[in-house]
Image (cartoon, helix red, strand yellow):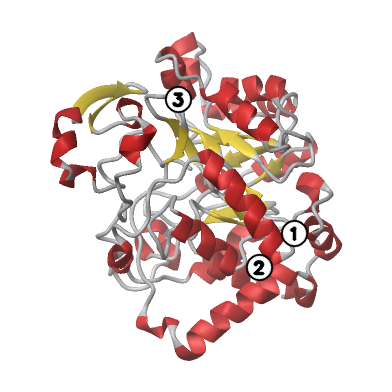
Amino acid sequence: MGSQDARESNERASGGGTGRRALLGAAVLGATGGVLGLSGTARAADARHGGGGLKSLPVPTVIGHRGASGYRPEHTFGSYQLALDLGADIVEAGDLVPTRDGHLVCRHEPEIGGTTDVADHPEFADRRTTKVLDGVSTTGWFTEDFTLAELKTLRAVERIPANRPHNTLYNGRWEIPTFEEVLRWQDEQTRRRGKQVWIYPETKHPTYFRKLGLGLEERVAKLLHKYGKDRKNSPVILQSFEPSSIQRLNKLVDNPLVVLLSAANTRPWDFVEAGDPRTVADLITRAGLREIAGYAQGIGPTLDLVIPKDASGRLTTPTTLVRDAHAVGLVLHPYTLRNENPFLPADFRKGTDADAYGDVFGACRTYFATGIDGVFTDNPDTGLLARQDFVNG
C-alpha cells in the first residue's frame, strides 16, 4: 500500500512483562470479537467459519499493513505471521510485482534496493539501473530483471531503519515470498487457527508492467482460481491505485475489489497514460464514487481525504467522503495509521523523536468517529486496542 510512507519505530523493551501481556491479551480479544461487545460480533463469528464475505468482517476492520510492519521488515512471513498473532482481521499479504520469468512476488515496489540485501550481492551489481516508473526516474534493482530463483537468494531488510531501528534486528532473516506461497500460507494458517484468515493483495504499477508484457491481473486471477479463492465470498480482497486494474480484475474474478486513492490533486497513472484528465478529486465526487461502485465494493483513500490537515499538519474538519461513499454502497478502508510521531497528525505527536510513539489512540478515535469501515495500520495490536476503546466507549 501506497503513498504515505516514512519510517518506523520499535519493539521497545517494555514489550516484555506487563506491556507484552496487555498486547497479547488485546490480540486475543480482538480476534474473538464478542468479548469486546463489537457491533460486528455476529459477523466476526461468521467470518471465523469462512462465510459471509466482506460484510462478515468486524467494523472497524483492523488491516495489518504489509503484515505487522511496525515490528518486522514488511512483506515477509515474519511480518505476516505476527500480524495474525496480534489479532489483525486482515493481513495485507502481497503488494504484487512480477519477476522476469512471470512469477508474482510480494514487495512494496519493484525497486528492491531499499527492502532487500541485493546491494550486498556482487553477482547482481550489474543489474543496478535507472528506469522511469510511472513518470518518476528511479535508480536501483527491479524485480522484473530477476528470475524467481535469483530473488530467492536475497533476504528482506527494514525499509525505514531511521524510524524503526529495532526492526533491523531481523534484517536477513526472511526471503521474498511469492503470492502462491502466501495463498498456501493462508490456508495453513486458517486450519491451524480455526478461523478464516483474510488477505488483501495489491496490484502494483499494473500499466507499467503490462507494457513490459508482464500483465498482473491475469496472473492474479489464475492463482486465485487455482486455489479456489476467486469468488464473491472468498477471503481475498484485491486493491489497486489504478482503476483500470480493478476494472480488469472485475471481469476475471468475483472477489471484493477496492480502488485506492492517493492525494486529491494526483492522477492515477493509468489515467495519465490514457490521457484521462481526471484527478482523485474527481473520483471522490458523488458522480465519481457512483462510477467506482459500478465495478468495485470499496475505496482505500489516504487518511487525508477523510480528515484533511492544515498547513501545520493538524487535523481539520472531516470531509463528506465517508457519507458519500456509504451512500453508493462502498466501504472505506483508509491508509495508513502508524504509531511513530512523524506519521501522525501534528496534534497527536509527543516530543520530537522520529521513532517515538505519539498519541495514536487519540488519532484512531478521531478517525474511527468519522464512520470509516476499517483502517490499514503498521501496528495491528494498537489498532485492536483502539477499536476496543471505540466500540466500548
Residue 61 shows in this picture: no
Which residue is drawn at the image coordinates 48% and 60% (left, top)? 68
The answer to whether residue 165 is above or below residue 129 is below
Q: Which mark is residue 58?
A: 1
Residue 2 relative to residue 324: left or right: left
In the picture of the structure, the residue carrying the numbered disc 2 is 387
Instruction: Give amino acid for label 1.
Output: Pro
Mark 2 or mark 3, earlier in chain: 3
Q: Position of residue 183 (x, y in %)?
A: 60, 44
SS at circle 3: loop
Give the labeled residue for mark 3: 102
Q: Which callout, 2 or 1, points at the residue further toward the start of the chain? A: 1
| Closer to us: 228 or 162 | 228
Measuring from the top left, give residue 303's x and y in whole percent: 53, 48
Name above or below for residue 183 compared with residue 388. above
User: What whole-number distance in Å separates the C-alpha atoms at marks 2 and 1?
Assistant: 10 Å
Looking at the image, do the residues carrying marks 2 and 1 touch, with CB atoms under 8 Å apart? Answer: yes
